[in-house]
Amino acid sequence: MKAVVYKGPKEVAVEEVPDAKIERPTDVVVKITTTNICGSDLHMYEGRTDLQTGSVIGHENMGEVVEVGGGVERIRVGDHVSLPFNIGCGFCRNCEAGNTAFCLTVHPDPDMAGAAYGFAGMGPFAGGQAEYLRVPFADFNCLRLPEDASEKQNDYALVSDVFPTGWHATEMADLQPGESVVIYGGGAVGLMAAYSAILKSASLVMLVDREPDRLKLAKQMGAIPIDDSKGDSVNQILELTNGLGADKGCECVGYQCCNHHGQEQPNLTLNNLVASVRFTGKIGTVGIFLPHDPGADSEMHRQGRIAFDMGKFWFKGQKMGCGQANVKRYNRQLRDLIHRDVAKPSFIISHEMALADAPEGYRRFDAHEPGYTKILLKPAA
């Protein structure tokens, strides 16, 4: 089968790789109909992780089940399914508690919790930027889609990661109806955090970024865009909140955040959030922070360490939640919001490409070319 393979920093290729196949009775094989290029894929693309050359990448996947293992009870051939990017077993302590991003079974390293498709450090599982994908523990990991799966495919394509991850940011921030929230980062996840806040009836949603396409989408959905290239973002937020700061905050950038000069400053958004959120406010952090960053500019940053304003954070009595989204905690209800026409997250999608065009898609997306906000790959195209 054809798949997108990591060749080294700034280089991916579409190559023939061994077919996905049933390896355990609880597996299924899915024919991928839509798979997405995620902002977190760019960390690997740029060589900022320890991803092995030759790895098949892609963790935002959906498709049609074409083969079923003998131990699968619920999922059937022909089912259209969305696949959470994090792989869970369904029966360990963390999965039973709903913390499926931290499954204790699926990763072969006993010192690790959690696994994902085609992602550095997240286990041996191939990614779904391919024609077919093996799905382990399929009864647990496959979310069946309703009869409008084809009609609303681009909406459901976002249920595997960015929509639930954006929702997770607002959940960790404990956002309540009528509250204000500031979101740092206007990529796909940040836009989905803002969209989730609007769906949850936040009274004021502010989104900080500097790319015109992202700010335009934020305004289009009803959020207030804050361009931090035109002035200090903290001051702009305080001005909009009568000097008090936002009730809640979401970090949706991660360790490659940059200052207004375009220079990387890994601690910038977290410290800006501490300054932007009111006393006793809460922050949800879903932007990726890794324990190892081989491309960082200092030894401290290479070890995944940053200088955090702990004194101000403590003095303000704030709370913070962090970590990957437990997709299965949210994906069923988000699917139903789409099915009932309450949510239509596909407004962030800018491009659909054939699998063969993935290298061009990566290049353009990584270069932040105008208009490239979210790319879907269609392996059947």
Image (cartoon, grey):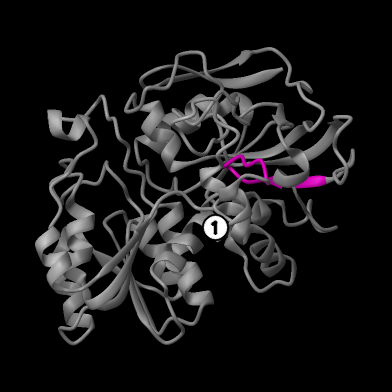
Q: Where does residue 378 sit, x and y in percent of width and height?
A: 67, 36
Q: Residue at x 73, y 21 (%)?
A: 20
In the displayed orientation, state which residue is furthest to the left: 311
Q: Residue at x 54, y 52 (%)?
A: 99
Indicate the amino acid at tag 1: Phe
Comparing 196 with 50, the one in front is 50
Q: Residue at x 73, y 37 (%)?
A: 137
- Res. 186 in view: no
Q: Where does residue 37 sit, x and y in percent of width and height?
A: 52, 38
Which residue, given by chain and number where applicable, does mark 1 sit on?
Answer: 163
- Res. 304 in view: yes
Image height of 8 relative to 243, above or below: above
Q: Does the magenta-highlighted stretch encompass residue 60?
A: no
Q: Does residue 62 appear to the left or right of 236 in the view shown?
A: right
Q: Residue 58 lies in what quarter of the image?
A: top right
Q: Residues within 10 Å of mark 1 (few under 14, many from 20)?
A: many
Tell me which segment is drawn in magenta. Answer: 80-90
Q: Where does residue 19 sit, x and y in percent of width and height?
A: 73, 16
Q: Report the number of numbered marks.
A: 1
